[in-house]
Amino acid sequence: MHRNTYSLAALAAAAVPGLTPVRTAPIATPVEDLDVAGIVGEDGTRVIVLSPATTAAGVRLEQDLKVADALSGTPLQGVVPPVLGVVKLPAGGRCAVTEAPVGRPLMLDDLQGDSDLARSLGRVLARIHTVPRYAAEAAGVESFTAEVLHARHRTRIESVTQAGHLPAAVAQRWEALLANRELWDFTPQFVHGDLSEESLFVAGSRISAIRDWSSSTVGDPAADLAWLVSSLESERFDELYTAYREELPTSTHPHLMERAQALGEFAVADWLAHGLELGDEDIIADARGMIADLDADLAQLARDEAERAYVEMRSHEGTATPSTETRESS
């Protein structure tokens, strides 16, 4: 069942000894069937209370709490709001109260206009991807091999291709990406799995908090970079990626960026498949529009490549002509 902010405040008081709520504020959340509110205590303490409205939401919340707890002993502890208390709900499951994230939710425009913030996010991403395996195992996250992830991508792309939803150029590009064995030969690492503007908080020019770890896995680090490489201007992403590489204790996979770009494109196939499954015409139209944009981009790249080849050919012809004339005159 859904709860209003007053009910959530009462649950927060029950979960955290000594907390006396004096003010509440609803907080928009992208997590389906999860009621969230900000609570200000009598002593000025600021917390977030999260209450699942369904069993599925409760499972996601429990996973989020387990991962957050496991990360408390890693370099990420400063950006993972600690859990302050939990309380059982009458209908089953638990309500949780965490420390309120410092700052405000991130907007992509913040990254576009702030080099320091982009570098801060790059460093945070590197720390996520270097979380020790034991911490991931303690959180009980799923672990996938590179082979399994590659097979999943292939199955999804083949399904939308065979259903006739992809232009020939897009289908050929995605098939070529999937056929590149070197691209998918990587070592799985701990990943957040669902990074977005809603899950990141910013204070000044630094990432101050990361929320919602329920989708975390041991998987492909490119998944956490895909939305950024497709959304940020190239110069800003380069700054982010440079900081990311500098923070890592080892070198990155040689094809990490290419794979992140591929995953960003494959996400469109996911969106289309989701729309088709639901029969949602708005989602289907949106996905088809993005596929059409990609098709247009590929067509432009082909034209640009043909023009470069033509110019190069004419350049070679131009340099060859004088030497021929010179030989004839002599």
Image: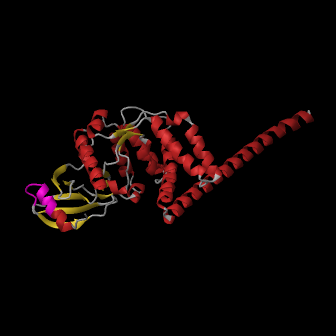
Q: Residue at x 23, y 50 (%)?
A: 81
Q: Nearer the viewer, residue 227 or 177?
A: 177
Q: Residue at x 28, y 33 (%)?
A: 134
In the image, residue 70 lies at what x, y percent? 24, 40
Q: Residue at x 81, y 38 (%)?
A: 320
Q: Is residue 119 above or below residue 43?
A: above
Q: Is residue 268 left or right of residue 201?
A: right
Q: Residue furthest front?
A: 91
Q: Mark yes or no: residue 208 visible.
A: no
In the image, residue 139 lies at what x, y percent? 27, 40
Q: Nearer the viewer, residue 155 or 299?
A: 155
Magenta region, mostly helix, strand or loop? Answer: helix
**Quarter assignment of residue 23:** bottom left
**Quarter assignment of residue 75:** top left
Q: How many marks?
A: 0
Q: Is 35 one of the magenta-colored residues?
A: no
Position of the N terminus by quadrant: bottom left
Q: Is residue 27 left or right of residue 178?
A: left
Q: Is residue 230 above or below residue 128?
A: below
Q: Nearer the viewer, residue 120 or 28?
A: 28
Give the magenta-colored segment's residue range.
10-19
Q: Residue at x 46, y 60 (%)?
A: 278
